[in-house]
Amino acid sequence: MLKYLSKYEFVSFFLCLGSIQCFVMFMIFINYNLTYLYEFEVMLFHSIPFNFIIYLDWMSFMFIFVVLFISMLIMVYAKIYMGINCHQFLWMTVLFVLFMVIMIMSPSSLGVLLGWDGLGIVSYCLVIYYKSYDSFNSGFITAATNRLGDSMLMLSITWYSMNGSFIFFETEVSVVFFMIACMTKSAQFPFCAWLPLAMAAPTPISSLVHSSTLVTAGVYMLIRFFNSFNSSIYLWLLLILSLLTVFIAGICAMKEFDLKRVVALSTLGQLGFMMVILSVGHPYVAFFHLIIHALFKALLFMCSGIIIHSSLGTQDLRKMGNTNTDSIVLTCMIISLFNLMGMPFTSGFYSKDSLVELTYMNYSGFSIGLMLLMMIMITSIYTTRLIMYSCSSKGWIMYMSSNMKLSICIMILAVSNIFMGCFFNWIIQELDFIYLYSYIKYMPILMIIMGMMCYSLTFKNKKTEFFMKEMFYMMSITKMISLIFCIFYNMMKIMDQGWFESYLKNIKITLTKNSLIFSNISSDKMMFSLGTFLSLILM
């Protein structure tokens, strides 16, 4: 039977077998509370053992199951979206999934770094896949930001290797480096500009990157090593930056008209929610929200991709509408958007409701809970705005009929979104006794209703609108980094090829008794060279 399948379907078949096996292992490990650790010695350097460790427990099997399940559907989806002959895209996607699985199973920094660097390299290749000017710029910013996180991870490895340890993040300075690395990978403020720019990648890989692989790597690593920095004072800084990230993402999504960028900004907001609940001391709730977010965000990206594919590449929300011509796509998209809002008794409701209530009960107090309620209202505003633009009858586009295989993929994912939230909540949720007043209990639902009523909220001031679209000027500052690199390169070129080569040829040095005499060099050239040298030192 396999000889009649294409390469995409062949890879999808093996991913399906792997996801089934991981789900069975997850049920066995969580029922019998099993944990296995395999350690392989790579090298021994000055009594410091550099070991490659594979750690298997219910959390790793559960996350691998979600990654393989989403990848299986995306492979079938990508065959129709990208075309059968895109073999380069196929194998880059397989490598992307492989590096993510390596990072999930490795608690040691050596394995984390292997998966971490692999994700960064393959993500750069996928962002520049279309080989346009915008995609090359977006790929450079994505690679530079992720490389900053890689360097921070290497610094943390070097720091605690100097202290004779290699597995756990125990020293305080290495914890700082590790947290900065995770913040860059999960696009927390001020490293949040690369996430919307990574939308230059093809939509199938965007649905994989922004749901369960690249952007969730930082959150997953913080969950895994949470006990190492649980008592660290830097959790307060992480809490403040994550709240700021949620606010910036919500405000920017309210004024964005690019469909894929709105979905990317919603991903940024949900990553901020995970960081918030992690900062107040509930890693398992953060992991629960990570799993649920992976499912409904993959569905939302796949539905958006079908709409873009059917409209021959149009992504502007102002031109869209009349999506009710394909009732399956519209129904699945509304299911994913309801999960994003946290509508009662959807999968997103179980994780977001636990997130807000546990924040109320934490030492952070009622103020952080009120801020989260405001973020829920902002999420409801841009989600309702997305629904209204999609369902309006004022569209300019005639849609082509979607392929049946695409519809089957999103239907399978929509059914899993309906039932997986209740199932995972029953299995892995923390058993905390939460006692709240009834009016506090109803506040999230009230915020959702208020957000749906205020979806047409606009800002008349053009400066305010530009400030919001540029993510509080973080987008402009990040893009200027490449300009700074170009200036630095040109100054190095002037110094190397100008002062040290051509100018020295024109300098005749004659030694007198007590002085140096410079001749055959003009004062203008000398001042220019000295100014360049001082500017280089200042940079």
Image: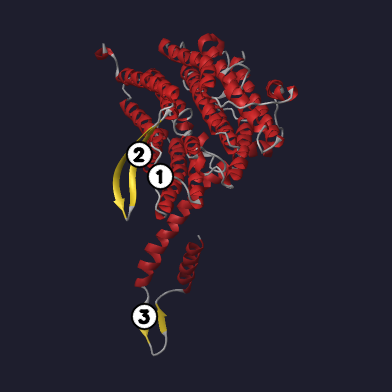
- Label at residue 53: 2
Image point (46%, 66%), residue name: 533
Is there CB contact under 8 Å for labels 1 and 2?
yes
Mark whose residue sits in front, 1 or 3: 1
Marks 1,3: beta carbons within 8 A: no
Q: Residue visible at 42% across and 34% down?
A: 127
Identify the amino acid type marked 3: Ile
Task: Quickly name the residue at label 3.
Answer: 509
| Picture coordinates of residue 108, whole percent (x, y) | 39, 41
Asked which quadrant contains residue 497, the reply is bottom left
Q: Is residue 76 left or right of residue 419?
A: left
The label shown at residue 351 is: none
Q: Residue furthest left?
A: 3
Residue 70 is situated, as x and y percent measured from the top left of the image, at 43, 22
Q: Which mark is residue 167?
A: 1
The residue carrying pointer 2 sits among few (fewer than 14), some (14 to 19) or many (20 or more) residues within 10 Å by Cα, namely: many
Q: Position of residue 2 (x, y in %)?
A: 26, 14
Residue 208 seen in this snapshot: yes
